[in-house]
């Protein structure tokens, strides 16, 4: 379905609103493909089309939600009736309400590549098969491929409300990813690689293979590292995960729930002077970029930390209203079935200089972290305390030395931001809402032997 068709459906649903209530509708359609190769053949292939509608009604400060998986007129009317009924049982909340146009104009960015619609199933399967083949041929120590996957999607969405919101959009995405195994005489290691784009022509099989092979073979012979306080270096992948945790703590939603160590600290120094952190949803190169948030407001750049000082928080309409602020166009919802939450679209640090090797050389001695386990469960959202398992490489004399695993690092998120001593320029985008660069963080506790 095309965006204008979905918009017409959304308009019809909004027309069902009754006096005294606010009504918002999200209509979504998608066509998605998944393919997996194994031993040179297709192991799994699914192509599925789906559609759905979600309705949110606010009346007398009570909110009700409902959704349906079909778009016929009877289902739409029933969905509205259920949302209205659910609102009657909702808990009163003085801040409940829908987003309203805020005067920020939508800056259209190209998120749709028409070429994806003409890619055949055979071509999609072929790229997954090629990914597996090249992985196994890249190095004699590569002995297996747990997964060699291709996925794509065409997603169209329309949103409309009685408060004056009316937006429709369509985007495409394509992805290849692999999880591979390598073996030496006395060790077995694993590693991943990936590539993302708007269509199949954007995907780089060679880059995905190189990443997976490097992550595998660089970990041969890994042992525990000695316990100490030292500088740790996060590669772009780990940095992106770290920033994802930071994003949760600078959410207006987290502040309202009392689950952020940064609450009440706008304007204060919360990071090293050289640290600038911002969300740029309009970066078309980001796989999760968007020009409209999930309440229909224009996306915009949001400066969170500027020169080490906290500039503000990410907000949707509700968190902004409850905190006496304004929405930053940061509403997110997992699907049309959900009420909007808060989150970034393309979070990143302002780049410094050099690539990973340059940051390692400047650090001199420390620990390069390339993989983290238990990151979300290892972070206290109130205090920001962090304790997680890691693996990577020892840094000695400005160069990478032996591989290490079964090591734990401990600090706090606020302290790590304040101790961020170096930032690289190797911006790397991932298939989620935070990009990464190589960063160095001082005075971290490493527990090993």
Image (cartoon, helix red, strand yellow):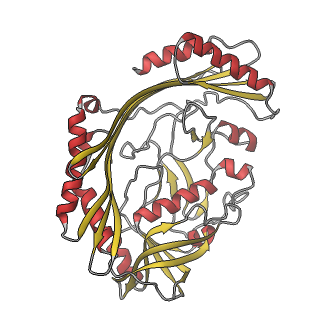
Which quadrant holds residue 385?
A: bottom right
Residue 437 in view of the camera = no
Q: Quadrant of residue 151?
A: top left
Q: Is residue 279 above or below residue 411?
A: above
Residue 62 image offset from top left, x and y in percent: 78, 28
Of the pair 289 and 83, the residue shown nearer to us: 83
| Side (left or right) of 355 relative to 82 | left
Query: Is residue 142 positioned above or below 21 on the image?
Result: below
Q: Is residue 349 left or right of residue 203?
A: right
Q: Residue 327 placed where, x, y %?
A: 63, 39
Q: Position of residue 31 (x, y in %)?
A: 38, 29
How many dots with numbers?
0
Query: In what quadrant of the picture does the N terminus appear?
Result: top left
- Corner quadrant of residue 13: top right
**Which residue: 57% across, 54% down?**
247
Q: Which x, y percent locates residue 145?
A: 29, 59
The reply to whether residue 30 is visible in this rendering is yes
Vertical arrangement, residue 80 with respect to residue 40, above or below? above
* Residue occupying the point 60% across, 75% down: 411
């Amino acid at each position: 379905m095309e965006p204008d068709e979905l918009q017409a459906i959304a308009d019809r649903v909004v027309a069902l609103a009754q006096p005294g209530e606010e009504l918002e509708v999200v209509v979504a359609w998608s066509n998605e493909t998944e393919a997996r190769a194994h031993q040179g053949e297709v192991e799994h292939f699914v192509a599925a089309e789906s559609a759905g509608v979600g309705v949110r009604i606010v009346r007398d400060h009570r909110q009700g939600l409902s959704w349906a998986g079909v778009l016929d007129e009877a289902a739409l009317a029933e969905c509205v009736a259920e949302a209205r009924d659910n609102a009657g049982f909702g808990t009163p909340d003085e801040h409940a309400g829908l987003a309203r146009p805020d005067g920020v104009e939508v800056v259209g960015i190209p998120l749709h590549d028409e070429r994806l619609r003409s890619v055949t199933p055979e071509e999609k399967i072929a790229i997954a098969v090629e990914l597996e083949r090249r992985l196994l041929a890249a190095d004699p120590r590569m002995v297996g491929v747990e997964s060699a996957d291709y996925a794509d999607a065409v997603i169209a969405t329309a949103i409309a409300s009685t408060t004056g919101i009316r937006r429709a959009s369509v985007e495409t995405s394509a992805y290849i990813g692999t999880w591979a195994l390598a073996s030496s005489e006395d060790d077995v290691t694993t590693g991943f690689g990936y590539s993302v784009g708007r269509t199949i022509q954007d995907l780089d099989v060679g880059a995905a293979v190189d990443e997976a092979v490097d992550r595998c073979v660089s970990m041969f012979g890994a042992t525990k590292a000695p316990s100490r306080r030292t500088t740790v270096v996060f590669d772009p992948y780990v940095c992106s995960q770290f920033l994802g945790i930071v994003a949760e703590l600078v959410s207006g939603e987290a502040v309202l729930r009392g689950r952020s160590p940064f609450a009440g600290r706008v304007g204060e120094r919360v990071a090293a002077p050289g640290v600038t952190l911002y969300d740029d949803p309009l970066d078309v190169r980001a796989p999760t970029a968007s020009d409209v948030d999930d309440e229909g407001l224009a996306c915009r750049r949001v400066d969170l930390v500027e020169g080490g000082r906290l500039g503000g928080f990410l907000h949707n309409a509700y968190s902004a209203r409850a905190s006496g602020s304004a929405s930053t166009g940061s509403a997110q919802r997992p699907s049309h079935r959900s009420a909007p939450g808060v989150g970034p679209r393309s979070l990143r640090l302002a780049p410094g200089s050099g690539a990973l090797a340059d940051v390692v050389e400047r650090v001199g001695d420390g620990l390069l972290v390339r993989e983290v386990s238990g990151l979300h469960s290892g972070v206290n959202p109130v205090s920001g305390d962090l304790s997680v398992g890691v693996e990577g490489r020892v840094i000695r004399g400005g160069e990478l030395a032996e591989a290490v695993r079964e090591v734990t690092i401990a600090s706090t998120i606020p302290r790590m931001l304040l101790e961020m001593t170096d930032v690289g320029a190797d911006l790397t985008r991932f298939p989620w809402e935070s990009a990464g660069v190589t960063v160095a963080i001082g005075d971290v506790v490493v527990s090993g032997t």
